[in-house]
Image (tube, rainbow, N blue to C red):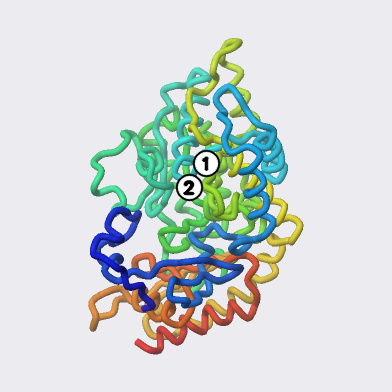
Amino acid sequence: MDTLTTPGSNSLDAYWMPFTANRDFKANAALISHAEGLYYFTSNGHRLLDAIAGLWCVNAGHGHPRIVEAIQKQAARLDFASSFGLGHPLVFEYANRLTSIAPADMNHVFFTNSGSEAADTAIKIALAYHHARGEGQRQRIVGRQRGYHGVGFGGLSAAGMGPHKKQFGMLLPGAVHLPHTHDPVRNAFSLGQPRHGAELADALEQMIATYDASTIAAVIVEPVAGSTGVLVPPVGYLERLRELCTRHGILLIFDEVVTGFGRLGRPFAADRFGVIPDLLMVAKGMTNGAVPMGGVIASSAIYDAVTGKAGSGAVELSHGYTYSGHPLAAAAGLASLDVYVSEGLFERAARLEPHWQTCAHTLKGLPGVVDIRNLGLLAGIELGEDPVRGKALARNVYEHCFDHGVLVRPVANTIVLSPPLTIGEDEIETIFATIKAALKSD
């Protein structure tokens, strides 16, 4: 792997890195110095085709000039303004633009600074909604096994990835979990949505029988589960979940931090699947990764219930962040949305999906490949274990690809892929050819 020699034993020590084996990384550090378009460059000049869009977020490619210019101009004009009882025009403009591409009747957005904050915010809004309607006993949150909703206490409680929880105790009480939808026996190597598994949504009925619907506030799921290895929902699964939530007065929250802003060839996964949630979480691609930002888009019914309950002059929702609706983030969000729409990136992703799918499934039958999952410009290549080296094959593939100029993401035993939507067919072929060479080299 291309590495950077550091001049001094403590030069990298001060930074406690997130989700990183700090000691291993700092002993053999590879640092990114700059980026342009589809590529990262390390401090040693090694060029890397970015097959993961930074971290699911750089949908328009790195350093897009219109986004860079918007941030620069805004920094010179207004660097910060509080959203607590104040405001600035740009954030209201962005809220209107964002809700204009949101699913029907989702007309209000609460801005946060990340997907993790969006998860906690969505949960709090759900609780506040039921409280405003006189059903404050609805406090239970239903997540899903293998779900990921960031690292705040609310999102982590609703999430279903055990290794992320084990250091932090019991977290929030009352969170329960639906079964995940991964069924390799029936669905391995599905092209797009798997055919089997819609009935797994009916586990919500069992929870209702156990806890009673009157105690359940919300169900929170990723339409496509990203961080666990790209788990695509079975045909009919989200539709059944929506019907059950509606029938029992339970709010449905979609975590679209990964799937939002064109990843599935539509503005949101809700559009792709034709299933409209009550609350929709966003982050990552909303600013093309250039400035931290997140948000929760809410239906008018939820907004009206929460704001209408409060008396005149009262704060309707006692929640927010210092940097909610930050001017630079709003500028980046507006510019990113302009780029996505004017350059047709959502439609581009839809056009590229068949080629992406075909290339991904050329890996079937290669050593170690046990499943391939794909939808939109997302893919998960699930691999077996390397009995010789005693570690997941995914890590071996990552290292080979890095050395050969392609950046992929190993998640346990799965290679996860989510390139910028500006990618072309040639680069798609390069990504999968490099993975293929990595698998054959082992």
**Residue 145 rendering spot, x and y as whole percentages:** 37, 51
Lower sequence index among marks 1 and 2: 2
Could you say which quadrant of the image residue 84 lies in? Answer: top right
| Residue 106 visible here | no
Q: Which residue is mark 1?
A: 253
| Marks 1 & 2, CB-CB < 8 Å contact | yes
Q: Is residue 10 above or below residue 109?
A: below
Query: Of residues 364 and 399, which is closer to you in this image?
Result: 399
Q: Secondary structure at mark 2?
A: strand
Could you say which quadrant of the image residue 403 lies in? Answer: bottom left
Q: Quadrant of the N terminus?
A: bottom left
Q: Amino acid at mark 1?
A: Ile
The tag on residue 161 is none
Q: Quadrant of the C terminus?
A: bottom left
**Residue 383 rendering spot, x and y as whole percentages:** 38, 75
Q: Which residue is mark 2?
A: 221
Residue depicted at 53% across the width and 78% down the height: 431
Q: Secondary structure at mark 1?
A: strand
Q: Amino acid at mark 2?
A: Val
Could you say which quadrant of the image residue 276 lies in? Answer: top right
Q: Is residue 13 left or right of residue 4?
A: left
Q: Is residue 94 left or right of residue 199?
A: right
**Residue 11 rendering spot, x and y as whole percentages:** 29, 61
